[in-house]
Image (cartoon, rainbow, N blue to C red):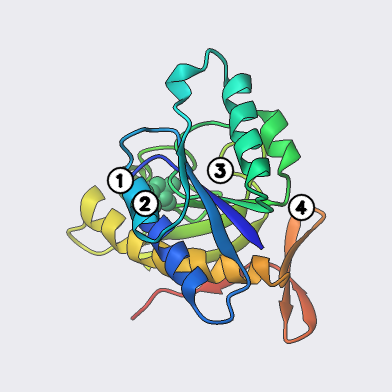
């Protein structure tokens, strides 16, 4: 399966996906990495792995529609079958999201549906939750919504601040996204209705994969 990855920043999740695709027998490979920011660190990560990159700078487009049309054109030209958002910080139009429906994944650093949007770690601390985590889900037009493929739980520890919590969650992200991608490329995580059905050794089970917090 040919994968296109959308990034805006440092690309640590992209790196985790690249490493997963390099595993023997992995049934997907990254055909193209697109950044909407010219200086994104993730571009160098992709280049170091020999993966084609493209900058589509949103500032050069007057509307979201024209930006998204260019994004779509580039993905289609590269033969991309599955899009992975990995720290991609642009809101996509409904038209783009609908076109890639059930063929676009996102990772979000909370246990959705809690803490959608931005400043997630500080909001989790402010709310006083003891468990947070990360979620990989299929993309829908509403931000940070869509059928959940997998979630990992991460504890909030005494003395945490937004930075320490973000770092702990990021480690979990780097394990979870490759795991979820593997399920999707192997056809073992499918959307049925608005839920993901997982294939466990040939048996279909409704519900996402859950990775408990590490001791
Ligand atoms: C990650 O925390 C991801 O969940 C969020 O943005 C961050 C991107 O980090 N959407 P990176 O660019 O993958 O290092």
Most foreground residue, 158 or 169: 169
Q: Residue at x 74, y 38 (%)?
A: 99
Does the residue at mark 2 contact the one at mark 1 (Cβ under 8 Å)?
yes
Name the image quarter holding residue 170. Answer: bottom left
Pick whichever of labels 2 and 4 is earlier in the sequence.
2
Label 2 sits on residue: 11
Name above or below for residue 79 compared with residue 62: below
Residue 161 visible to an observer of this rendering? no
- Mark 2 nearby-residue class (10 Å; few <14, some 14–19, many ≥20): many
Mark 3 residue crowding within 10 angstroms, few (<14) / some (14–19) / many (20+): many
Instruction: State the image coordinates of residue 209 (x, y, percent, origin top left).
Output: 60, 71
| Disc nearer the start of the sequence (2/1) | 2
Look at the numbered disc 2 and say if its residue's Cβ is closer than 8 Å to ligand 1.
Answer: yes
Instruction: Residue under label 1, please give it.
Output: 41
From the Cβ of disc 1, is ligand 1 less than 8 Å away? yes
Q: Residue at x 65, y 54 (%)?
A: 82
Left or right: 38, with 81 as reference point:
left
Q: Earlier in the sequence, mark 3 or mark 4?
A: 3
Assign a secondary structure to mark 2.
Answer: loop
Residue 205: image location, x then y, percent: 75, 75
Picture quadrant where residue 13 is located: bottom left
Is the residue under label 2 in contact with that under label 3 (CB below 8 Å)?
Answer: no
Q: Is residue 167 above or below residue 122?
A: below
Residue of label 4 = 194
Whole-angstrom CA distance, mark 2 to mark 4, is 29 Å
Residue tagged by mark 3?
144
Q: CA distance from mark 3 to mark 2?
A: 19 Å
């Amino acid at each position: 399966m040919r994968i296109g990855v959308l990034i805006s920043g440092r690309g640590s999740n992209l790196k985790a996906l690249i490493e997963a695709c390099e595993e023997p027998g992995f049934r997907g490979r990254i055909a193209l990495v697109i950044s909407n920011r010219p200086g994104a660190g993730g571009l160098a990560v992709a280049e170091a792995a020999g993966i084609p990159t493209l900058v589509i700078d949103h500032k050069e487009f007057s509307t979201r529609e024209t930006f998204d049309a260019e994004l779509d054109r580039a993905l289609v030209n590269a033969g991309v079958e599955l899009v992975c958002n990995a720290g991609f910080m642009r809101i996509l139009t409904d038209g783009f999201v609908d076109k890639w429906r059930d063929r676009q994944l996102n990772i979000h650093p909370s246990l959705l549906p809690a803490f959608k949007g931005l400043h997630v770690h500080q909001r989790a601390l402010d709310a006083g939750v003891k468990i947070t985590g990360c979620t990989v889900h299929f993309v829908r037009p509403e931000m940070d919504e869509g059928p959940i493929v997998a979630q990992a739980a991460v504890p909030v520890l005494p003395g945490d601040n937004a930075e320490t919590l973000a770092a702990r969650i990021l480690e979990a992200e780097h394990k979870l996204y490759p795991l979820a991608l593997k399920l999707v490329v192997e056809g073992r995580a499918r959307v049925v209705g608005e839920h993901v059905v997982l294939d466990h050794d040939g048996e279909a089970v409704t519900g996402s994969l859950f990775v408990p917090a590490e001791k």
